[in-house]
Image (cartoon, grey):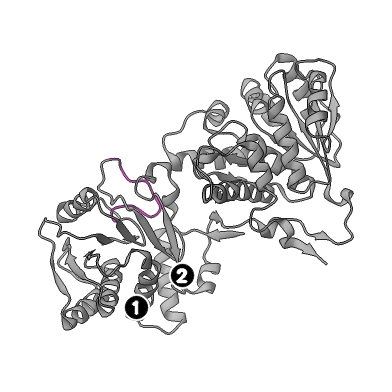
Amino acid sequence: MLTKLFTAGQIRQIDAETIRRQGLESHQLMERAGFALFKAMLPYWQPEKRVLVLAGPGNNGGDGLVIARLLHERDYPVAVRVVRYTERESPDFALNMARLRELGVESGDFDGTLPAADVYVDALFGTGLNRPATGVSAGAIAALNASGKPVLSVDIPSGLYADRLNAPEDPVVEATRVYTIQFPKISFFYDENLRYVPAYQTVDIGLDAAAMNEMDSDTYLISGWRDWMPARPANAAKWDFGHAVLVGGSRGKAGSIRFAAKAALRIGAGWVTAHVPEGLVDILQTADPEIMVASGRESGFLVEFPWPDPRNAYGIGPGLGTDEKTAEAMKSFLAKAEKPVVVDADGLNIMAQHPRMLEMLPAGSILTPHAGEWERLAGSWENTPGKWEKARVFAQKHNIVLVLKGHYTVVTDGRQIRINPTGNAALAKAGSGDVLTGMITGLLAQGVPPVDAASAAVNMHGQVADEWVRSQNVFALTPQDLIKGLAYVGNALLCNVRV
């Protein structure tokens, strides 16, 4: 499942189309937004806690004023300070300011000193900001950041651009939580902005669905995995779900290939074979008898790969090692391969040492590098937008799918950028990527298209980790826990059973 993400200009157009198509006045849409935001922020509203709304004179500030009025009407202690970075007020801000004054809500202009409060609502700037905050607005942002209290940002942290990177010195609110309207903003997923957006919550205000559907976008949020999972009819047999072959392993790295193979089986592949050095056969047969094992001649590392059968899906790299004989075997395999393959770990390291292998990849093949592997493959980048663009161009050039693993893993086929929001630091452990490789390979075996197989796998992989940390600590997750979690994530895979 994918959710479109939009630029600041597109968001303005969607707002305008919503007002036109739904027959609204602009202040009515603001009322709807303010009420939805107020409800979403309920966990922070307590009778004994004073709230201060810091509002700019534009429409983002107007949303903040609606929140202040709703708090006052329910007897919560609230006050407003207006940060007048311009003398002009938007009409809807002025309307809501007049309503507050009629109700006697405490209000005034921000004079450089932030009144004491228990919770601050940041409503200075919205997505229309196109230059750094300066003067009184920069002072207000600095005061919020120094407050030591929860700061709830309306739609976007004030000072942050919606679809491009800020300069490091730009004043930006470091929100406790961002309540973003209708969809997250593209900039939320830049590594550089994690300090400003440590957590966000999407607030549905009923923007026009048709207007959003009609708006073009090449950037998406991966917002679920169920739609990509193959159906499992009641009369299904193992051959309906394909054969996944995981190629890898070397002396001391039996675990990597074992995790990948087990994950392929757990995600639904009909049957799974691990192709490993001869010395690892007994280990895998004993540990996981449900996985078939094939072997090469050498005991400690692979010197030959299986013949690529187009009926199978292949995942290459976990624990593989980078011996030159292994590299030659991989090159020979790719020269004969006809269908997409998944390449990870040492498979990527071999490719970095032998760049011509990139030209041998079958169309639609999936590479899954972490940051270090990606830099070895493609060179350095300056920032997150640059990294994404490099990935898009690389994927398009080689007609492949790239999975750039990170805090927000990105999947691209050269046309779309798909951002995955699931996952957490519990995954920062050796073996987590091997599990992901097996999951993607298992989905390929079941006939899921490459870019969708990658998208579903990264989303589910991250969701297992998210569900883990709700009941366990962030330090303890192991690859085996991840594999077990695939049986339970999202109330199990039974969602697509057809009876």
Name the residue nearer the viewer: 306 or 265.
Answer: 265
Image quadrant of residue 46?
A: bottom left
Q: Residue at x 53, y 60 (%)?
A: 4
**Residue 206 position in % (x across, y down):** 47, 74
| Classed neighbour count for the residue bearing mark 1: other residues with Cα under 10 Å, few (<14), some (14–19), many (≥20) | some
Q: Image check: 72 left or right of 23?
A: left
Label 2: which secondary element: loop
Q: Is residue 209 above or below residue 222?
A: below
| Classed neighbour count for the residue bearing mark 2: other residues with Cα under 10 Å, few (<14), some (14–19), many (≥20) | some
Q: Is residue 398 visible?
A: no
Residue under pointer 1: 31
Amino acid carrying mark 2 in the image = Asp
**Residue 237 position in % (x across, y down):** 89, 53
Image quadrant of residue 13?
A: bottom left
Count of numbered badges drawn on the protein: 2
- For the record, the magenta segment spans 158-168
The secondary structure that most of the magenta stretch takes on is loop
Q: Image check: 154 left or right of 226?
A: left
**Residue 12 position in % (x across, y down):** 39, 67
Name the residue nearer the viewer: 340 or 30.
Answer: 30
Nearer-N-terminus badge (2/1):
1
Amino acid carrying mark 1 in the image = Glu
Q: Is residue 95 above or below residue 199?
A: below
Name the quadrant of the C terminus.
bottom right
